[in-house]
Image (tube, grey):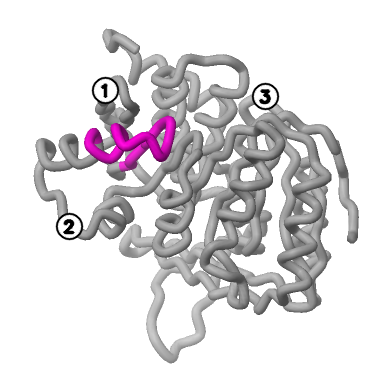
């Protein structure tokens, strides 16, 4: 196993099994066939768990990012993580770490996102990941992002088992079959599906606020998660547990990019919970971070100054 800049006993551990090198650039116009000249190119380490660790670091906390990476591009990802001074452990794989690309079209203000499927991960490789988690102490274990080809759909349930054996709180941000398998197992601290992902999970659309609140409350009362957070894009998010429901609107902002908003939400909420904030306060902090993430085209997911400012706006006059 390759080892990077490590802090073995991090309070929060994040897991990314399908990370990416995130490229971003600008172009005047995106057209077929023509060669598209780009400017302002940046490259940052990405993938759900890595992004969560980046946000926690930005907000003043520490996290250990565990991720699978390899091929010709794996060392590039490691170097980008090192540049951000994130504690990390790399699980080597044979396949090439994927490279994603976001292109901002200046003429229209639209953002084009190209996200590869990711490399094939062998059974020996994903089992090595589980072994690393078994040997890593933590209070919170955050699994975030999609699975790579070759990984079983119930992979995150194995991660749940490891968290349970450690007495660590398990946080999950994924979708589809992977999310359903883990929810069926239960014992999750919090999950953060989008409203579309939540609708897919329960098998029906929720076109009105009343229908959303009823379905979210009903699901939360089942007790398979401590806290259910459903994000609504520019409309904010909904928090529910066995004691009730809280809906918070995001402040009106000029959205410049949607990249990393969900990861920023998860990172901020997990960090706030880890330092003892009340669940609804932590939820509001997550909403603030998700909103802060849309303010920039540049490689920042969110900034602490923006998050603190937006948190004050969101919570003004709200009983948490």
Can you give x and y, in whole percent of width and height, for residue 117 in the image? 54, 75
Can you give x and y, in whole percent of width and height, for residue 150 in the image? 62, 77
Disc marking residue 287: none
Q: Earlier in the sequence, mark 1 or mark 3?
A: 3
Report the front residue among 27 and 221.
221
Q: Is residue 206 above or below residue 217?
A: below
Q: CA distance from mark 3 to mark 2?
A: 40 Å
Residue at the disc numbered 1: 244
Q: Quadrant of the N terminus?
A: bottom right
Q: Is residue 219 magenta?
A: yes
Residue at the disc numbered 2: 204
Q: Secondary structure at mark 1?
A: strand
Count of marks placed on residues: 3
Disc marking residue 60: 3
Q: Which residues are magenta?
A: 217-231
- What is the quadrant of residue 98 in the picture? bottom right
């Amino acid at each position: 196993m390759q080892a990077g800049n490590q802090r073995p006993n991090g309070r929060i551990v994040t897991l990314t099994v399908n990370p990416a090198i995130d490229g971003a650039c600008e172009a005047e116009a995106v057209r077929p066939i023509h060669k598209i000249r780009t400017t302002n190119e940046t490259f940052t380490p990405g993938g759900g768990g890595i992004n969560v660790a980046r946000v926690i670091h930005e907000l003043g906390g520490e996290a250990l990012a565990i991720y699978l990476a390899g091929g010709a591009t794996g060392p590039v990802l490691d170097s980008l993580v090192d540049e951000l001074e994130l504690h990390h452990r790399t699980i080597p794989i044979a396949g090439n770490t994927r490279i994603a690309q976001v292109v901002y079209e200046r003429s229209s203000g639209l953002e084009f996102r190209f996200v590869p499927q990711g490399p094939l991960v062998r059974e020996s490789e994903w089992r090595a990941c589980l072994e690393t988690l078994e040997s890593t102490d933590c209070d919170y274990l955050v699994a975030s992002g999609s699975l790579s080809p070759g990984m079983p759909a119930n992979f995150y349930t194995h991660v749940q088992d490891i968290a349970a054996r450690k007495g660590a709180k398990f946080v999950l941000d994924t979708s589809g079959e992977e999310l359903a398998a883990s929810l069926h197992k239960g014992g999750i601290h919090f999950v953060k599906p989008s409203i579309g992902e939540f609708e897919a999970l329960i098998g029906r659309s929720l076109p009105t606020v009343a229908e959303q609140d009823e379905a979210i409350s009903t699901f939360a009362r089942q007790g398979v998660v401590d806290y259910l957070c459903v994000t609504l894009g520019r409309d904010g998010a909904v928090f529910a547990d066995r004691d009730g429901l809280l809906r918070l609107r995001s402040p009106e902002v000029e959205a410049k990019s949607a990249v990393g908003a969900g990861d920023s939400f998860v990172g901020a909420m997990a960090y706030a919970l880890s330092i003892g904030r009340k669940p609804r306060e932590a939820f509001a902090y997550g909403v603030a971070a998700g909103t802060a993430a849309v303010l920039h085209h540049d490689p920042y997911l969110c900034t602490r100054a923006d998050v603190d400012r937006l948190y004050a706006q969101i919570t003004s006059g709200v009983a948490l």
